[in-house]
Image (tube, rainbow, N blue to C red):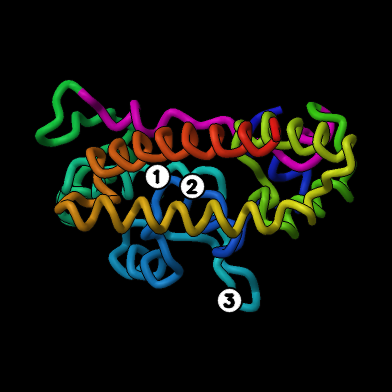
Amino acid sequence: MSNAQAVRAQNGTGLLSIGQVLDLLQGEFGDLSPSKLRFLEEQGLITPERTKSGYRKFSQAHIERLRLILTLQRDHYLPLRVIADVLADVDRGQDPVIPGAAPRSASSILTPRRLLGREELQRLTGASSRFIGEAIAAGLLPAADVFPHDCIAELNALIKLAEQGITPRHLRAMRVAAERDAELLTQSIDARGGRSGSPSGAEGALELAGLLETVRGGVLRRRLSR
């Protein structure tokens, strides 16, 4: 099943709302917001479809275009006018080299990332639709009709925990603590003069996250061995 088919199987159109787009991409682009999406539309860089009521709807092609735009902004610091030129070349069927980043080309960013519809996620994990809904309600999975591929491992872990009586609702506090940890690490990177949204800042934050997991694991093991 292709990415577009996975989405289509969920909502009948293959289109996502602004909220679903944010759920899908904010983990990768933390500064993405509804106002930024609207701004990119106003600049003519992306043109989502509209329902009869005027609501914006985004296809898989829109998602990949957004990833290209946001990556060119964040990782390559390109101004919007240059990004518009890159997009124009892509629309003409070309594979433009990213200015200042040769030999990397647009196609290396546009390579689709595996997305799963809810039915496919159920099939791969054996989870029920209700269990996935509980995980979403607890904030442990993204509230979207499509899911990143790494949600398979997360959902399998949640299933095994539930078999031992630890259900998604029991893990709400853990999710809140993880969000606080992420904010702490972001503040640490920013305080040291880095940019948490830049490639080096993101790498530094992930390194700190690994150290934090080591400390947390040690505390948990000692507590369990008492």
Please identify the quarter of the rendering in which residue 101 is found.
top left
Residue 43: x %, y % from top left: 28, 65
> Does residue 175 appear in the picture of this structure?
yes
Q: Residues within 10 Å of mark 3 (few under 14, many from 20)?
A: few
Three-letter amino acid code at disc 1?
A: Arg
Q: Residues within 10 Å of mark 2 (few under 14, many from 20)?
A: some
Marks 1/3: CA–CA distance = 24 Å
Disc on the earlier residue, 1 or 3: 3
Residue for point 22% across, 48% down: 83
41 vs 206, nearest the viewer:
206
Residue for point 29% across, 32% down: 106
Q: Is residue 51 above or below residue 95?
A: below
Marks 1/2: CA–CA distance = 6 Å
Q: State yes or no: residue 75 in magenta.
A: no
> Does residue 62 appear in the picture of this structure?
no
Residue for point 53% across, 39% down: 216
**Label 3: which residue?**
54
**Label 2: which residue?**
63
Three-letter amino acid code at disc 3?
A: Gly
Element on which disc 3 rests: loop
Three-letter amino acid code at disc 2?
A: Ile
Q: Is residue 5 above or below residue 194?
A: above
Q: Is residue 24 left or right of residue 72?
A: right
Find residue 166 and name its label. none
Q: Residue furthest left?
A: 100
Find residue 67 and name its label. 1
52 vs 151, nearest the viewer:
151
Closer to us: mark 2 or mark 3? 2
Q: Which residues are magenta?
A: 104-123
